[in-house]
Structures are given as C-alpha cells and as structure tokens.
Image (cartoon, grey):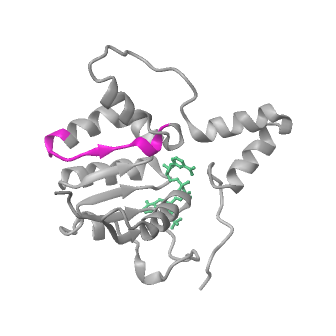
Amino acid sequence: MSKELNIGLIGFGCVGSGLYEVLNKSKLISAHISKIVVKDRFKIRSIDESHFSYNVDDVLKDDEINVVIELINDSDAAYDIVKRALEAGKDVVTANKKLLAEHLDELIAIAKKNNVSLLYEGAVAGSVPIIRNLEEYYNNDSLTSVEGIVNGTTNYILTKSNEGIGYDAALKNAQELGFAGVESYPRRRWI
Ligand SMILES: NC(=O)c1ccc[n+]([C@@H]2O[C@H](COP(=O)([O-])OP(=O)(O)OC[C@H]3O[C@@H](n4cnc5c(N)ncnc54)[C@H](OP(=O)(O)O)[C@@H]3O)[C@@H](O)[C@H]2O)c1
C-alpha cells in the first residue's frame, strides 16, 4: 500500500509554487502540502498568508509531516534543513544543485542511517529522469562517469545563445522565465 504523503514544503519561489500548483491539480498523487516555510514576511504571495510559516521548526518538529521538500535558493541554509529533516526520520526531496555537489555523500549516509530516502532528480538535467534511469537500468553496470551539460538552466542559455541572441539576453530571458535566479525580488508587500 502506498503511503500517504504529508508534505512540509520549504521555499515557495519558482519551483516551490509550481510544485504546489501541480500537486493541487493532480488527482493521481495522494499528497498533501500541510505547511509551507518561506523567508520574507513582506512578499506578496499567490495564495493566502495563512498557508505560510517563517520558522523551519514548524515543519521539522511536526511529527505528522513525513516528507520534506526543500526548494530554497540558499544552499547553506538548505544543508542545515535537509540534514535535520533526515535526522528527524523524514524523507527528503531537494532540487538544490550546490547542496548536492558539496554534501551528497554525507547526506546519503545520514539518510541510510535513519532509513529514509533522499531524492534529488529535480536537481539534475531540468528534471529529465536521468538519476532514476541510471539507478534502475544501470545499477549492475560499471559506469564510472557521465559527461554532458546535465543542467536545464545552462542548456537553455546555451541553446538561446546559439540561436544568436547572445549570453546576456539569454540569461535575462531565463531569469524572466524563472529558470535562473535573480538578485532582487520586484514584488513586495510593505507594512
Ligand atoms: N528555477 C528552476 O528552473 C530550477 C530548476 C531546477 C532546480 N532548481 C533549484 O530549486 C531551488 C529553488 O529554486 P527557485 O528557482 O524556486 O528559487 P526562488 O524562485 O529564488 O525561490 C526561493 C524560495 O526559497 C525561499 N527561501 C530562501 N531562503 C530560505 C530560508 N532560509 N528558509 C525558508 N525559505 C527560504 C524564498 O523565500 P521568500 O519567498 O520568502 O523569498 C523563496 O520562496 C534552488 O536550489 C534551485 O537551484 C531551480
């Protein structure tokens, strides 16, 4: 029997809000986002303020939440959150490339020790299912490395650059579409 997913979502930016929308529309997945943790109290949100918390402990210390989905844009804070979530016995999904590049082995060891899953397909190749394919179909093969531009944002920028619009315009385009990060947030609610 598949287990009921009671999700604590950390981060409600481009990816987090997109995930929220998809899960709300899907009738196939038995998953419920019960809390959303964000950082900026003054930002205008697309859903009601009552959905949000500003304290990560509201998710990490909630025994009802069995899955933490980490989608923030700060890899140091993400390291702390992911580590604590795994140690608290929660399955974790993350899309944080820098976090994984720096701490993957350690986080896998913590997940194994606590008998929980660490899933990170969304961090690789713009969510093309490459990790699962490698694990399921090449598990017994002796693959030692995979080479390529396995990052959706980089691929988008390179494709657009090759179309002749240039790097700066391609990056701006990717930022406007929410693929690449931006330095500041234009939409704010001031009190
Ligand atoms: N965008 C993409 O196409 C894409 C693709 C694959 C992977 N990723 C990865 O997915 C992650 C999220 O990317 P994104 O584009 O969605 O970022 P984003 O739009 O910049 O949103 C980041 C979110 O994280 C929240 N946040 C930041 N620090 C926090 C903290 N300490 N505690 C709680 N919340 C915090 C922000 O809160 P506020 O809303 O309060 O500012 C915001 O909601 C990143 O690791 C990124 O590399 C992104």
Image position, residue 184 (x, y; %): 66, 60
| Image position of 152 with respect to 177: above or below | above
Image position, residue 29 (x, y; %): 34, 62
* Foreground pick, 34 / 191: 34
Left or right: where 148 falls relative to 62: right
Q: Residue at x 34, y 35 (%)?
A: 104
Q: Is residue 42 visible in this depiction of the protein?
A: yes
Q: Residue at x 15, y 46 (%)?
A: 114
- Magenta stretch? 112-124
Q: Is residue 38 visible in this depiction of the protein?
A: no
> Quadrant where the C terminus lies?
bottom right
* Foreground pick, 118 / 75: 118
Residue 97 belongs to the span the image colors magenta? no
Quadrant in which residue 152 is drawn:
top right
Image position, residue 42 (x, y; %): 55, 77
Q: Residue at x 52, y 62 (%)?
A: 18
* Foreground pick, 185 / 22: 22
